[in-house]
Image (spheres, grey):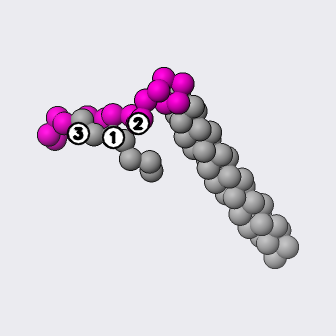
Amino acid sequence: MGRLMFLAAIAGGGYMLYRKFISDAEALSARGEQKRAEQKSGATGTLVQDPVTGEYRVKNAD
């Protein structure tokens, strides 16, 4: 019974690491696509509107 719980914990941890890796890879890919689109269009950044003041500012990299 102890081995089964140990293997379940190892499998759960491995799955969590796998999901973290996938989410990081998707975020990196999205950032790369955004950079490529900015370079293609000649833009120097992406503007976002502040919902409180209504002013536009350059989007910060998260």
Q: Earlier in the sequence, mark 3 or mark 1?
A: 3
Residue 17, image quadrant: bottom right
Residue 39 seen in this snapshot: yes
Q: Are marks 3 and 1 in contact (CB under 8 Å)?
A: no
Q: Are marks 2 and 3 in contact (CB under 8 Å)?
A: no
Mark on residue 58?
1
Find the magenta span and give its range: 38-55
Magenta-span inclusion, residue 27: no
Residue 30 seen in this snapshot: no
Report the side of 13 relative to 45 (left or right).
right
Mark on residue 50?
3
Classify 7 as above or below 61. below
Report the side of 36 relative to 55 (left or right).
right
Residue 52: percent from the left, percent from the top? Answer: 16, 41
Residue 29, image quadrant: top right
Q: Residue furthest top?
A: 41
Residue type indicated by callout 1: Val
Q: CA distance from mark 2 to mark 3?
A: 15 Å
Q: Earlier in the sequence, mark 2 or mark 3?
A: 2
Residue type indicated by callout 2: Gly
Classify 18 as above or below 42. below
**Secondary structure mostly taken by the magenta-highlighted segment of the chain:** loop
Residue type indicated by callout 3: Asp
Classify 10 as above or below 52. below
Location of mark 2 (residue): 45
Question: Helix or strand or loop: what does disc 2 sit on?
Answer: loop
Q: CA distance from mark 2 to mark 1?
A: 6 Å
Q: Which quadrant, please, contains the N terminus?
A: bottom right
